[in-house]
Amino acid sequence: MRAVLPGAARGRSSAGVLHTRAASSKSAMTSPKDLEDLSSDANVLSLAYGGHNEDILNKAKELLAESTRHALEVEPPTCPNLNYGPQLGSDRFRSSLASFLSRRYGREVKSERLVLTCGATHALHLVTSQLFSEGGLVLVEEPSYYLALGLLKDDLGMRLVSVPLEEDGPNLALLEHQLTKLRAGSQFKPTPRRPFWCLMYLIPDHHNPTGASISEEKRRGLVELARRFDVLLFCDDVYNLLTYPPARVGPLLITYDRDSPPTPGVTPPIPVGHVVSAGTFSKICAPGVRVGWLEAPPRMIEILSESKILFSGGAVNGFMSSVMASAIQLGLLDKHLDGIIAVLQEKLELTLAFLGRTLPPERYHWSVPCGGFYVWLRCPFDTVPFAAWCEKNRGVLARAGAAFSVNGSGCQHHLRISISYLSRDSLQEALSRLCDALLEYEAEHGGK
C-alpha cells in the first residue's frame, strides 16, 4: 500500500463534524472572506489567505474595464446581457468559454456541456441540492477544503465520511471497502432525476491544502468505482489552470468518464456519466466577478436545466458572464492568466527553496506541488497552539492543519502555507519569520 499523505487519517473513516472557525469581530463589509486569514495590523503578514493580492487585482481592473466596454458595445439593441437569460448561460458565454478551455486544456470542450455558475462553491451547492436529499452521504478526502466541508455538512445537512488522501490521491482500496460496507443493505434505486447513490467531493489537481494531484491510475480507478457504486464524482477543478511550467495541465478526471455506460436497473437505461468538473474565474481573474462554470455529461446538463433556481434566476450573473466572454474574445484573459502563473511560479520556487535551506528535513516535511496556491508543511508538534503563538509573537498568520480535517482531530501537526497573497519580498520576510518561529517553538515545546 502507498504511504498515506502526511496529515491524512489512518484506518477506518467515519462521519465527522467540521470544527468551524470562531466568529470574527472584524466587519464583513470591509474585509475579504476568511477574516482570520488576514489582520488589520499591517505588521502581521499572512501565509494563510488563499487569494490574490492588490497587484494582480489591479491588473484585473484593467481587463474588466476594457471587457465591460466591449460587452456593452457588442450586444444588440435588445440588450440580452442585461435581461433574464437562458438558465444554462448565454450561447456567447458558453461558446467563448469552450474555446478558452479547449485551448488551455489541450482537448475539445463542448459548449453544450457547460453550465454558467457563480463559482465553484455555487456549483457544489447546486449539484448537491439538485441530486441528493438532506442526510445523504458525501465522501470527502482527508484532509480537504474546510469551507466545502462546512457547506456540505452545515448548510446542506449531508453526512460526511472521510477517505485518507495519499501522495497520489485517495486510498482506493479503503474507498472500495467503505463503499461496499456503506452500500450493503441500501434500498437505493436510481431514477431519472436521482441517478446517484452518493456524492464524492474531490480536488484532483494542486489540492487544497496539500498541493497534491491525483495520478492517472487513480483517476481511472475512481471512475471505475463511481460506475460500480452509482457515485457522482464532484471535481473542484479550480487550480488545474494554475499549473506551472515545465508541467502541463493534465487530463481532468472528467476526461476519463467519456464513455460512461448506462445506469443499470433503470428502464430505459440512463446514460448519466459519473463526473462533473467545477471551474471558476476567481483564481484565474478575480474573485469579485463571481462567475464560474460546470462541465458535465449530457444527462447531468438535462437535470440541471430543470433547476428552478436557474430557471427563476434566468442565467446566474448573466451580465458578468458576458464581460468574461469579452475578456476571452479579446485575448485579455489568456494574457492575464499567463501573468498570474509567472508570478505564482516564482513565489512557489522561492518558498520551496527557502524551506529547503532553513528547516531540517529529518523533522520537517513539505509537499512539492507543481501548481496552485499551497504548500503543506508537517511539523514535529501540534500546530494549533503554534499558529496562535506565531501570530502573537512573530507577526505571521498560517492556518493550522486541524481545520482541514473532517472531524477536526486530524492533521494536527500540519500547517498550510499560502503563496498567493503576499508580494515576493513580503513572502520572503514572512517565511523567514515563520521558520525562525518554528525552530524556536520546537526548542521550547519539543513535540508537544
Image (spheres, rainbow, N blue to C red):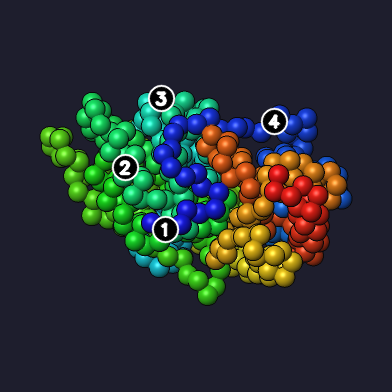
Residue plotted at (72% across, 52% down): 47
Residue plotted at (65% across, 69% down): 349
Chain-order first, disc 2 or disc 4: 4
Q: Amino acid at mark 2?
A: His
Q: Nearer the viewer, residue 342 or 433?
A: 433
Image height check: is 23 above or below 83?
above
Secondary element at image label 2: helix
User: Which one is in front in this view, the residue at disc 3 or the one at disc 2?
Assistant: 2
Image height check: is 130 above or below 430?
above
Dot 2 corresponds to which residue?
Answer: 177
Chain-order first, disc 1 or disc 2: 1
Chain-order first, disc 3 or disc 2: 3
Question: Does any portion of residue 432 appear in the rendered image?
Answer: yes
Q: Are marks 1 and 2 in contact (CB under 8 Å)?
A: no
Q: Would you say 174 lies left or right of 55 here?
A: left
Residue 20: which numbered mark, if any? none
Q: Amino acid at mark 1?
A: Arg
Residue 22: which numbered mark, if any? 4
How far is the residue under mark 3 from the one under mark 4?
25 Å
Question: Does any portion of residue 316 appear in the rendered image?
Answer: no
How far is the residue under mark 4 from the one under mark 1?
36 Å
Q: Position of residue 420 (x, y in %)?
A: 67, 57
Chain-order first, disc 3 or disc 4: 4
Dot 1 corresponds to which residue?
Answer: 2
Dot 3 corresponds to which residue?
Answer: 135
